[in-house]
Amino acid sequence: MEGKLICLLLSVCNGKIWKPKEVPKPKTDDLQIELDLDDEYEQALDTAEEAELVDLAAILGLHSMLNQDQFHASILNKGQKIGDRFESIVHATKPKVLPLEPDNDTDVDKTLEQVCNNDPSLKKLNWNNIRNISREKMKRLFEGLKTNTHLEYLSLANTDLYDVSAEVLVEALKQNKSLISLNVESNYLTGSMIRDLIDALLTNQTVLEFRAANQSPSILGNKIEMEITKLVEENKTLLRLGLCFDVPDARVRITEHLQKNNDRIRLRRIGCEP
């Protein structure tokens, strides 16, 4: 019996005893940094509320400890809310209720007669958002624009303008030499009509700003965009163009050309025209 017990103990203790590996202790800096504050600072920090510490964290640039409202309040020097804490819940800011824009009260018939009669007192015409203008009045406006020599700004955004009426506008742009800004955004002009309008600007090259974005349909197409790009590159006076392009090459080339036109104006202003 004793011999069997000894053999059993020897078989149990035959393997190696497992010992965990020693993990090296992290090294600590030998230099101990002591922050010596004045008694006034220590007393102020001991008695400061957490809202004041939040404001102090914003001043020190510890923005990761703050939420957006706390950071914005510190930038505007408004102070933190009473009871504000570092773990305060961010609540959505209520949007400001803005009043609706008033309706455009421009007298269509009166201003139409002024354009047709070449009234020198009418420099700007804004028919934006007037939706009940007939096509006959639109065409008459563009016919009057052909001989007008005083109108400088024409804005026809959201006026239900179609290609049929815009065809007369194309001819008017080829004859008019006083217009410097044209806005036909948010209408129903096709890409080919927008191309024709930009092509008409080359005749006199007096228009500095042309805006025709947000049309229905909104997609111009690759072919139209590249044709518009070539026309814009031929225009030496256009400074601002309001159009959305999907082709990256068109966007880059037009942006670079408009920048060149603006630089040319700047050099001319300082007397260094090339």
Image: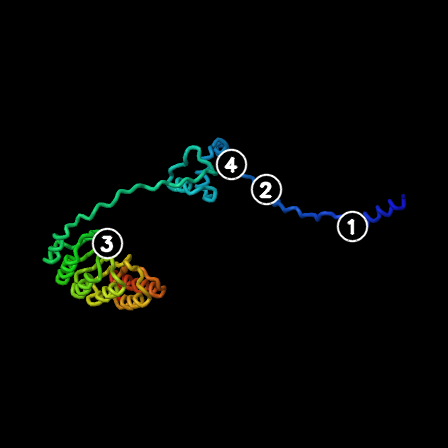
Q: To which residue does mark 2 refer?
A: 32
Location of residue 174 in the rendering, given as x and y in whole percent from the top left corner: 18, 66
* Residue 208 in the image: above or below residue 4: below
Location of residue 131 in the rendering, given as x and y in whole percent from the top left corner: 20, 52
Of the image marks 1 and 4, the number of the one nearer the N terminus: 1
Estimate the spatial distance between the alpha carbons at disc 3 and disc 4, rounded to whole Å: 66 Å
Estimate the spatial distance between the alpha carbons at disc 4 and disc 2, rounded to whole Å: 16 Å
Q: To which residue does mark 1 refer?
A: 16
Asked which secondary structure carries label 3, the reply is loop
Of the image marks 3 and 4, the number of the one nearer the N terminus: 4
Q: Amino acid at mark 1?
A: Lys
Location of residue 198 in the rendering, given as x and y in whole percent from the top left corner: 24, 64
Q: How many marks?
A: 4
Asked which secondary structure carries label 2, the reply is loop
Residue 263's disc is none
Estimate the spatial distance between the alpha carbons at disc 3 and disc 2, rounded to whole Å: 71 Å
